[in-house]
Image (cartoon, helix red, strand yellow):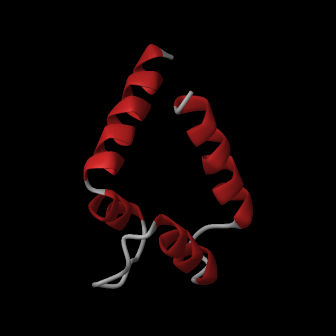
Amino acid sequence: MMNNIADMMTMLQQIKADPIGMLSKRFNLPQGISKNPQELLQYLLNSGQVSQGQIDQAMQMKKFFMK
């Protein structure tokens, strides 16, 4: 369990340092895409790469980790 938390914290730091680069490892993002988080999420949702449920879950995790 401790390793999972450490992995999640490492991933959080990577996302903060280079959000587009980190997301590009998992998702198909076009070159020159906006760095605006809302626009990124909307693109991923519109392109079918994530569901609204996944976005909602990520937002809950953000609230938990950003306390």
What residue is rendered at 36% in x and 40% in y? 11
Q: Is residue 23 left or right of residue 32?
A: right
What residue is rendered at 48% in x and 72% in y? 40
Q: Is residue 7 left or right of residue 50?
A: left
Picture quadrant where residue 53 is located:
bottom right
What residue is rendered at 43% in x and 33% in y? 8
The location of residue 37, given as percent across then percent down, is 47, 65
What residue is rendered at 32% in x and 65% in y? 20
Residue 21 to residue 58: above or below: below
The location of residue 35, given as percent across then percent down, is 36, 70
The location of residue 58, given as percent across then percent down, is 61, 49
The location of residue 9, given as percent across then percent down, is 39, 30
Residue 37 to residue 48: above or below: above
Q: Is residue 28 left or right of residue 58?
A: left
- Which quarter shows the C terminus? top right
Residue 10 to residue 20: above or below: above
Residue 47 to residue 45: above or below: below
